[in-house]
Amino acid sequence: MRMIKWQNGTVITLDQTKLPLQEVTLEINSVDQMAEAIKVLRVRGAPLLGAAASFGIALAAYHSTATSREKLLVELENAGAFIKRQRPTAVNLFWGVDRVLYKAKAVKGNAAEVKKAVILEAQQVADEDASQNRKIGKHGSILIKDGDTILTHCNAGELATVEYGTALGVIRKAWEEGKKIKVIADETRPLLQGSRLTAYELKRDGIPVTLITDNMAGYVMSKGLINLVIVGADRIVQDAVFNKIGTYSVAVLAHEHKIPFYVAAPKSTFDLTRKAANIEVEERKPEEVTQIERMQIAPKGIEVMNPAFDATPLKYITAIITENRIIYNKDFGDFKKGKI
Amino acid sequence: MRMIKWQNGTVITLDQTKLPLQEVTLEINSVDQMAEAIKVLRVRGAPLLGAAASFGIALAAYHSTATSREKLLVELENAGAFIKRQRPTAVNLFWGVDRVLYKAKAVKGNAAEVKKAVILEAQQVADEDASQNRKIGKHGSILIKDGDTILTHCNAGELATVEYGTALGVIRKAWEEGKKIKVIADETRPLLQGSRLTAYELKRDGIPVTLITDNMAGYVMSKGLINLVIVGADRIVQDAVFNKIGTYSVAVLAHEHKIPFYVAAPKSTFDLTRKAANIEVEERKPEEVTQIERMQIAPKGIEVMNPAFDATPLKYITAIITENRIIYNKDFGDFKKGKI
């Protein structure tokens, strides 16, 4: 199922804040609406954010009244900067904006020609993501054996991508190949992407899934219930993988239990100019921790930490699965040299 | 503040399911009411459960119409068996029942004399818990240095005991000694004892506390923010400490980060006739995971695991603090020989 698409100047997607209880289609008609949807996680998931960012620039182009090429490019630059500010850690957002802006600047024609190229490029970004995820699934599925139980954290599924999913794409492929597998999904506090999205998506597709709270991950591992862990990634830097808060805890637990820990992510997630220490981690509002759907679950005014991501050092990662291949830990030197 | 007390045939306590938003006093007048309060966690926390169980037998005695000693003892035995069935993992429940039943049988007088002795013994159990916790606090506080930040999981506070708390008793004592400390509290899904109870209790008492979701424990450790971990215990067996689900994950993370991991618990928590493999772990209802205050947060009908406790092998535990002393890991052989 296509999670995001362009339809005559409107971007059509699913409002993920309403899942799993309601499937509400979201029609986005402006850069402002796209920025809001990104900010409050109506649209979320690293690869989907890449496509959403590209489509944001396409919306800016489509609705622009600029008649000169130069004026249009300035508008697109501003739209891109605005979109990037919504979520500082997600590299795909930056990548999606920059790729379309690069195309806009490369087109030598007039404003109308630039607009057309920008819209086509955004659609191209989405199409490529769908095809890359199937490749990730194909490469990764050999890591899953018949009968395996797989732990996953957050949602790196179809709902996080344009189609098919990354971590859940690998699981989906193994399932399509007829392997009898089971998934255990961390609920992923504070925003519950595991219970709201991963459990929903796998149940919808008939793949057996059991929901646990995040703090049960160690328990299920200690009971020998987990054969491998697969998660997605929001940004892969020289020395670590940034992903949803809690990923690092799961990686340490997997390491202690000698359970393979895999990351599935497209090449666009790699940001090899940087190290973990230089990445700003998005701190989200305290109400995400102290309230659930506006219901207060903690004392009012309590001090809270709410980092959206954590960094898992590469030593805890068994392999990274990209659309090109599986990169095993011993070859991580490769991607640091740009060979992904 | 006394968390539980006897008042003319009524047990007075706080309905902990209503915290932190409301402080509702609970008046318990029968064994059935006490069993319900234990089952749904209106009364919870290992040491408090010991006192509650003792008071449950006292209620059975007080309201009994039995005129013969023998008939009364049968009623008390039945009440004890009923109370024990409410939560199979909590050893203090068994201990509280058995201690009062032992006293009842030891009294050689008539029914009236047995009743009187039972009620006095239950009050004695409560008084001893209050005094033991202060001793635990005194022994343990030397482990906390001025300026330390302490991570805790679940609620082993005053709210989990008759008075003062075990893990939070140690923290409270250090605070009373003038040490400038901070606490980071795991929210402790599914029932949120960390956010609802620990954050509430520490804030009420003016001890600085910051709330995190359970899956942030690894993150805060990796950032060097945690100097030590202190938790309570529900049952200590020959080879492991049973405590709230998620404790094991925190212990593994502390071990990986070389952070001391302490358990504070009275001697009544020790059950040295058994090993972890022989302990039944209470599996609670799935709605605790799929709903918060009756609001659905996961797909309907999703498969769920909901163990209430996990077992932390002794190798992850730096020391256990009892009312007698600190037992360091190298001396754990002592308590296996009954020397606590």
Image (tube, coloured by chain):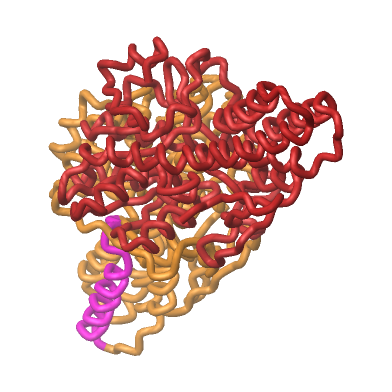
Chain colours: A red, B orange
Q: Nearer the viewer, residue A21 or B325?
A: A21
Residue A57: x percent and y percent?
69, 36
Residue at horizontal 61 percent and vertical 61 percent from the top = A25
B177 shown above or below B59: above
Displayed quadrant of residue A284: top right
Q: Which of B89 and A96 is in front in this view?
A: A96
Residue at horizontal 55 percent and vertical 49 percent from the top = A191
Residue A173: x percent and y percent?
29, 48
- Which residues fall within the magenta stretch? B68-91
Residue B90: x percent and y percent?
30, 57
Q: Which of B281 and A293 is in front in this view?
A: A293
Q: Is residue B81 magenta?
A: yes
A196 shown above or below B149: below
Question: Can residue A292 be seen from the camera position used here?
Answer: no
Q: Nearer the viewer, residue B172 or A32?
A: A32
**Image-based side of B324 in relation to B221, left or right:** left
B108 shown above or below B182: below
Q: Does the magenta stretch include residue B275?
A: no
Question: Can residue A317 be seen from the camera position used here?
Answer: yes
Displayed quadrant of residue B32: bottom left
Residue B248: x percent and y percent?
32, 40
**Image-based side of A265 in relation to A7, left or right:** left
